[in-house]
Image (cartoon, rainbow, N blue to C red):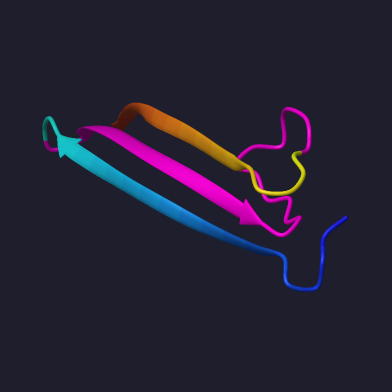
Amino acid sequence: PATADAKASKFAIGYVYPMSKRTSLYTSYARVSNKNGSNVRLAPAGTAGTGNFTSSGIDFGISHTF
């Protein structure tokens, strides 16, 4: 169970590379750190953590506007 002083912090960084006027590549990384029973995750999948745990993820893709 979370305590009254449960805390979470998040770090994220991303980059977009324009390939042309309408097409871009993108990527990002994020990490969430929990303390004192906080239960914050980047995605709903998986099992819940307890105590001091971290959740991290990476995202990348291509974007094209029509």
Residue 41 drawn at (x, y percent): 65, 44
Q: Looking at the rendering, which quadrant does residue 42 occupy?
A: top right
Task: Answer with left or right where residue 55 lies relative to residue 61.
Answer: right
Q: Residue furthest left?
A: 20
Point out residue 9 in the picture as x, y percentages from the top left corner.
Answer: 53, 60
Picture quarter with the N terminus:
bottom right
Q: Is residue 33 found inside the magenta-colored segment of the image?
A: yes
Residue 66 can be seen, yes or no: no
The region drawn magenta spans: 21-48
Question: Which residue occupies the extreme bottom position in the image?
Answer: 4
Residue at (72% x, 29% y) in the render? 45
Residue in view at x 73 percent, y 72 percent: 5
Q: Position of residue 39 (x, y in %)?
A: 73, 50
34 displayed left or right of 31? right
Task: Residue at 42% x, 53% y: name it.
Answer: 11
Query: Relative to 26, is 6 above or below?
Result: below
Residue 3 at least partly seen: yes
Instruction: Say whether residue 42 is magenta.
Output: yes
Image point (82%, 66%), residue name? 3
Horizontal arrangement in the rendering, residue 34 relative to residue 45 (left or right): left
In the figure, 4 relative to 33: above or below?
below
Query: Residue 51: horizontal and vertical position, in percent?
Result: 73, 49
